[in-house]
Amino acid sequence: MQAKYISYKETNAFSSAVLDYIGGKPELHSFYSYTPDFNGFAEAIEKRRYQGDREILTRVLHHKYASTAHSPLVEANINLLANNRTFTITTGHQLNIFTGPLYFIYKIVTAINLAKDLKNRFPDYDFVPVYWMATEDHDFEEINHVKVEDKMLTWNKQASGATGRLSTSDMEEVLVAYKGYLGISENGLKLAGITDQAYEGHEQLSDATRALVNALFGKYGLVCIDADEPALKQQFAEIAYRDITGENSFKYISESNSALENLGYKPQVNPREINFFYMTDGLRERIIKEGEVYKVMNSEISFSAGELHKEVNTHPERFSPNVVMRPMYQEVILPNIAYIGGGAEVTYWLQLKANFDHYGIDFPVLMLRNSAQIIDKRTESRMHILGISHKDIFNDTDTLKNEWVKAHVPLQLVLEDEQRAISAIFEQIKLSAYKIDKTLSDTADAAKTKTLKLIGTLEKKMLRAEKRKHVTSLAQIENLKTRLFPSGVLQERVLNIAPMYVLYGDDFIAALITSFKPLDHEFTVLFA
């Protein structure tokens, strides 16, 4: 595959907060600790003070991987985490079935490539790419479906509690449908075998997801972590108790949100007074405070402050952080140096730094994941015929059509020269009128504005009339946009890896590994 690169701004798909962050806008400096470049990483390496327990971390990982066949490189990377000169490069996502949208894949490739880049730049240290599995998330409706080209496949199930603990025993119908799409080509059969082994060979969704991700990325040394584990939660227990009873995250994140809003940015998440759930098998419900009692919503469970402290320390695994506290849990238990997220994640991490500072937890280097647009040969050929470049495709459909008409018809449809000439004539009229009566200047300006508006309207009518003569080419432009931007958004937000894997097999991921450059902060366009 051939890669070309454009700025994120040129895609018209990223928020001002993200663009300003990667652009280094000074107003945002107080919302993060280190710049997303080699200088920022050098500073982060120097200052990082890991407060977790490496022995516990490696023991838990070895235990979790005991039921998953994994590569020697994964084993070596887990062992490296016992060394205090090893850092993790982490990305995270929900347990979407069959990996969900393509950006799931792109996040992981970014982590793998960033780890390699940092090892080359800082050879005295080791960097392990990590996929944080959001096993405690309970929003089943967000993970139970996948779009394969124009067909939506759904895992129909009555689900409650943490998704990582869900049984995969009733996935046969959606698994058969997915394999049916993959077909009988060599690549299709290979991916079908991988998904079969993952979902039919493991009882829980967390283990199945680890097996699937490991099959795709294990040879690159990626380590998957499931933090739904008492030994890991114990390291976070005191912070959990302090935050539930002190409501500190609510205070500091709310203040950050207000500061960001004053700068013109829209916060992605809003904290609650208590940002933890109580979790057991089949149950993950918010903790709220009523008077002096801490209650678990939609249950009969409640605690006094003293009982809560005992419960947190005795059963830390029952206390699950929500979206605003999960990042801090991650940074407590991992020797993390960078977190890689999508645009929305980058924005919400900017909301969190003040709370990190309050608890004395190091804030990682915040990295925007790589994004990509895949253009197959047929689509590339159509773009060439239409005269549309890899940058042009990110314009909206009407703009593409207008530009095509202007570039491909013999008539002069853009009346800029005429408008300039009319403006010049009216300036002369205005001067003459001024000499007669100073008050006539405004009348001359109004006449000019009205005339230019009429010319602009005529230009639009000429353009519409010309479009009617080129219905076929303009329809091809519409089809091109629909193919490249399903549902009107970047294909990575909708499409699954399946069609790419069927066409290219392992070469697809290999091409991403070759093309993604995390520290260049550019959007990747891949011609397949």
Image (cartoon, rainbow, N blue to C red):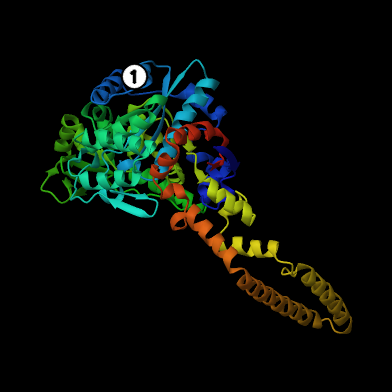
Q: Position of residue 190 (x, y in %)?
A: 34, 34
- On screen, residue 489 versus residue 286, left or right, reads right
For the point 79% across and 72% down, which residue is it?
418
> Can see residue 434?
yes
Three-letter code for the amino acid on which mark 1 is drawn: Glu
Q: Residues within 10 Å of mark 1 (few under 14, many from 20)?
A: some
Q: Position of residue 424 (x, y in %)?
A: 83, 72
For the point 24% across and 28% down, which residue is it?
234
Identify residue for label 1. 75
Q: Nearer the viewer, residue 460 or 131?
A: 460
> Does 375 appear above or below 88?
below
For the point 58% across and 50% down, which residue is it?
381
Task: Count every numbered label the image shows and give the total.
Answer: 1
| Quadrant of residue 448 within the rendered picture | bottom right
Element type at marker 1? helix
| Quadrant of residue 191 within the rendered picture | top left
- On screen, residue 242 versus residue 443, left or right, reads left
Q: Position of residue 454 (x, y in %)?
A: 70, 79
- On screen, residue 439 versus residue 172, left or right, reads right
> Does 292 appear above or below 130?
below
Q: Nearer the viewer, residue 119 or 43?
A: 119
| Quadrant of residue 445 within the rendered picture | bottom right
Q: Nearer the viewer, residue 81 or 198?
A: 198
Location of the N terminus by quadrant is top right
> Does 118 appear above or below 196?
above
- On screen, residue 313 versus residue 99, left or right, reads left
> Does 520 appear above or below 383?
above
> Can see residue 94?
no
